[in-house]
Amino acid sequence: MENMNKVIKILVALILVATNYYLITPSLVNAQQTTLSLSPPLLETIIKPGKSIVVGYRLENLADPVIVKAMVRPFRPQDNTNAITIQPTLTGPIAFTLDNADLQLEEAFFLRTKENRQLLLRLTVPTDTPESDYYYTLIVQTQPPPQTEGSTTSRSQMTIGSNILVTVTATGSVDIKGKIALFTVVPRYRISLLGKNWNIVDSQDRIPLIAVVQNIGKNVIKPQGEIILRGNFGEKASYDVTPKNVLAQSQRILSATPTLTVDCQNQPTDPLCQTASSLVLAGFFVGQYNLSTTLNFGESTPNLYAATTFIAVPFRLLLAVGVVILISLVIIRRSKKEKQTP
């Protein structure tokens, strides 16, 4: 029995020693905050072959000290919602370097908290570069810090970027060609009758309009203009098209203001959040309405025109009135039967 007690005391002592060791030497976990700012967010430039320019970017670290790396990558449009796909390697005729004495592209450097660094990005266009548009992104990406023994450091990366739209032209002339690829409302019903499609909506519906511009030229275009709504009782409303770049050989959904806005972050299941739209009409509509747009791409460019119509019917109001009439008839009929009963 005495030997058993000694064994128990030794085991307890060993457990206490092991516990104290882990309490004294816990593993270190670093929760680093990273907030970077890069400006300007967009660069648009026209340059001749054989020339170069230097653009100054401001990089600011607003959080914890961090190691970052700057690089340039080409991108291409992904769809008509302005999404882009950044390529994994630098390709294309334009050369990029940093004119900073102590910085180079693709090499990591350190940023202290609240430190500002100017990145002097040089764009060089060789003399044999074909006249066209070239699209790139200046990317600044955080790098994981060295991992010390006994510590657990977050290995996640933060990436910010500034798009670069370069138009190469020897004469200064550009190829501006665009067309309206789609201009239509999204109705509750679409009926084919008498050889024509009719867009039918409820009078209280929120009515999305989709306007898509296609760039069929070699250079970026920026549509501008307005959308007009006209009713059959003389109503008229005007909506300004927001000028946005449409990259060469791509499409983009336009946007116009004022428009009904939907909080898609808190209401992701809202039908208006499922499809991108240019404009959302809201109100009480009755009868036939005409929507039209006139667009151009700057001075001395032709106007483009498109139109569509919709018919608003107060289905819910008619249903409510029908229910009231039906209930009223039932009540009247019962009242007559009660009066005829002796």
Image: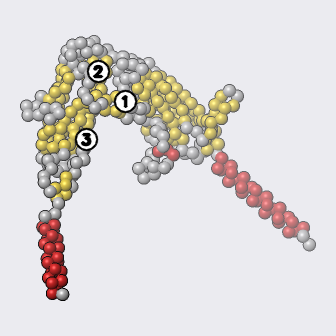
Numbered circle sitting on residue 159: 3
Measured as percent of width and height from the top left, residue 289 is found at 59, 35
Disc number lying in front (3 or 2): 3
* Residues packed near mark 2 inside 10 Å, few (<14), some (14 to 19) or many (20 plus): many
**Could you tell me residue 312's position as x and y percent?**
62, 40
Q: Is residue 164 visible?
A: no
Q: How is the image coloured?
A: secondary structure
Placement of 267 over or under 167, stated as above or below: below
Is residue 253 among what the camera can see? yes
Q: CA distance from mark 3 to mark 2?
A: 26 Å
Residue at 40 percent of width and 23 percent of height: 249
Cα–Cα span, label 1 and label 2: 16 Å
Q: Is residue 104 left or right of residue 47?
A: left
Secondary structure type for disc 1 = strand
Q: CA distance from mark 1 to mark 3?
A: 19 Å
* Label placed on residue 167: 2
Q: Residue at x 19, y 52 (%)?
A: 153
Vertical relation: 303 (above or below) 147 = above
Front of the two marks 1 and 2: 1
Where's residue 218, x and y in %?
Answer: 36, 19
Asked which secondary structure carries label 3, the reply is strand
Mark positioned earlier in the residue sequence (1 or 2): 1
Instruction: Return the x and y of residue 207 as percentages of the image width and height.
Output: 54, 41
Q: Amino acid at mark 1?
A: Pro
Q: In the displayed orientation, state which residue is furthest to the bottom.
A: 1
Marks 1/2 in contact by CB < 8 Å: the verdict is: no
Residue 82 position by quadrant: top left
Disc number placed over residue 77 in the picture, else none = 1
Quadrant for the C terminus in the image: bottom right
Identify the secondary structure beneath mark 2. strand
